[in-house]
Amino acid sequence: MPAMSALLLVLAVVSAVIAALAVHELQIWLERWAYERHAQD
């Protein structure tokens, strides 16, 4: 079933890209939150 394997590969790649973007956004959010928290002190 090469078509099934290709589909699974595409799903894996898409999932990896989404996960990487989510982690990147989370890091930016955490840095901004930490900066604002320190700015209030």
Image (cartoon, helix red, strand yellow):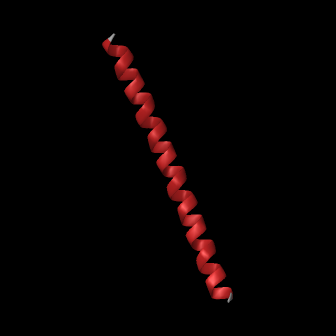
In this view, 18 is above or below 33: below
Q: Quarter holding the N terminus?
A: bottom right
State the count of labels.
0
Q: Is residue 22 above or below residue 4?
A: above
| Quarter-of-image position of residue 6 | bottom right
Q: Quadrant of the C terminus?
A: top left
Q: Identify the image quadrant of residue 29.
A: top left
* The image quarter in which residue 12 lies: bottom right
- Looking at this rendering, what residue extends furthest in the top direction? 41
Whole-percent x and y of residue 3? 63, 87
- Residue 16 position, x and y percent, is 57, 59
User: Residue at horizontal 45%, vertical 36%?
Assistant: 28
Residue furthest toward the right? 2
Q: Residue at x 52, y 54 (%)?
A: 19
- Residue 26: where, in percent of width, then height? 45, 41
> In the image, is residue 30 above or below residue 26?
above
Residue lying farthest to the bottom in this orientation: 1
- Residue at 68%, 87% in the rendered image: 2
The vertical placement of 20 against 8, above or below, is: above
Q: With 18 as the anchor, is 4 left or right in this view?
A: right
Q: Return the residue found at the far left.
A: 40
